[in-house]
């Protein structure tokens, strides 16, 4: 096996692992582990989900935004299979497409929809750093939704009420 082919296999494995670690950290609410998967700045496009415009954001600010948004869920499950990875000729950047299945559940009063499921894919840009591969762009494509997006509001409210009580 040539050194180039071996390097490609190692890089591809590390890129796939980085993507998987990101979603695992999100489900575990392990914000330092999640931050370790991100480049210093992150280009985000979640417009198909929330209608927000595309943005470039400091990754620490992205974590601080995500903490209260996701922190009130009873449980989430983000599954990211089918990684198709292209490593650019320079060897220090890559593009990945990853399927996405995301399930979100909150504790809600009777009669209120308490889950939201999302299926789609992500286009992900990666950069090689001294500490390994990091995500520099996340672009979500929504194919199918079920349940209520209100679970994000409920999650945020639950997070805020829990943290207001401890402040």
Image (cartoon, helix red, strand yellow):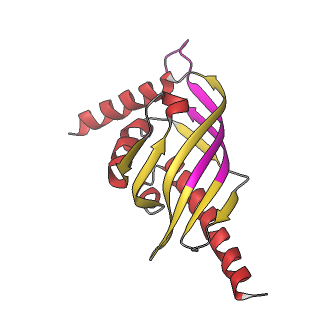
Q: Is residue 30 magenta?
A: no
In this view, 147 is above or below 35: above
The answer to whether 81 appears left or right of 151 in the picture is: right
Which residue lies at the image location 70% right of the left edge and 87% below the top edge? 3
Where residue 94 appears, as percent x and y from the top left, is 59, 63
Give the residue at the far bottom of this rendering.
2
Residue 84 is drawn in which quadrant? bottom right
The answer to whether 136 appears left or right of 13 in the picture is: left
Q: Is residue 98 magenta?
A: yes
Which residue lies at the image location 61% right of the left edge and 37% below the top edge? 141
Q: Over which residues does the magenta segment extend?
A: 97-124
The answer to whether 93 appears left or right of 3 in the picture is: left
Q: Is residue 66 visible?
A: yes
Which residue lies at the image location 38% right of the left edge and 44% below the top edge? 67
Residue 38 is drawn in which quadrant? bottom left
Which residue lies at the image location 64% right of the left edge and 27% below the top edge? 145
Residue 14 is drawn in which quadrant? bottom right
In this view, 167 is above or below 81: above
Q: How many marks?
A: 0
Where residue 86 appears, as percent x and y from the top left, is 67, 63
| Quadrant showing the C terminus | top left
In this view, 85 is above or below 160: below
Where residue 113 appears, as percent x and y from the top left, is 56, 18
Q: Nearer the viewer, residue 82 or 64?
A: 82
Give the residue at the far left of this rendering.
167
Q: Is residue 24 visible?
A: no
| Quadrant showing the N terminus | bottom right
Where residue 120 appears, as percent x and y from the top left, is 66, 38
The main secondary structure of the magenta stretch is strand
């Amino acid at each position: 096996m040539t050194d180039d082919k071996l390097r490609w296999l190692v890089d591809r494995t590390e890129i796939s692992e980085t993507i998987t670690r990101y979603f695992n950290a999100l489900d575990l609410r392990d914000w330092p582990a999640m931050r370790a998967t991100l480049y210093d700045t992150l280009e985000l496009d979640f417009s198909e989900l929330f209608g927000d415009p595309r943005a470039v954001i400091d990754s620490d600010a992205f974590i601080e935004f995500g903490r209260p948004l996701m922190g009130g869920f009873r449980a989430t499950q983000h599954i990211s299979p089918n990684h198709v990875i292209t490593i650019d000729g320079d060897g220090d950047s890559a593009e990945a497409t990853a399927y996405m299945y995301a399930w979100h559940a909150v504790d809600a009063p009777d009669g209120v929809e308490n889950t939201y499921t999302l299926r789609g894919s992500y286009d992900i840009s990666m950069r090689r750093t001294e500490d390994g591969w990091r995500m520099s762009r996340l672009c979500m494509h929504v194919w199918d939704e079920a349940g209520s997006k209100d679970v994000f509001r409920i999650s945020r409210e639950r997070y805020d009420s829990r943290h207001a009580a401890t402040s």
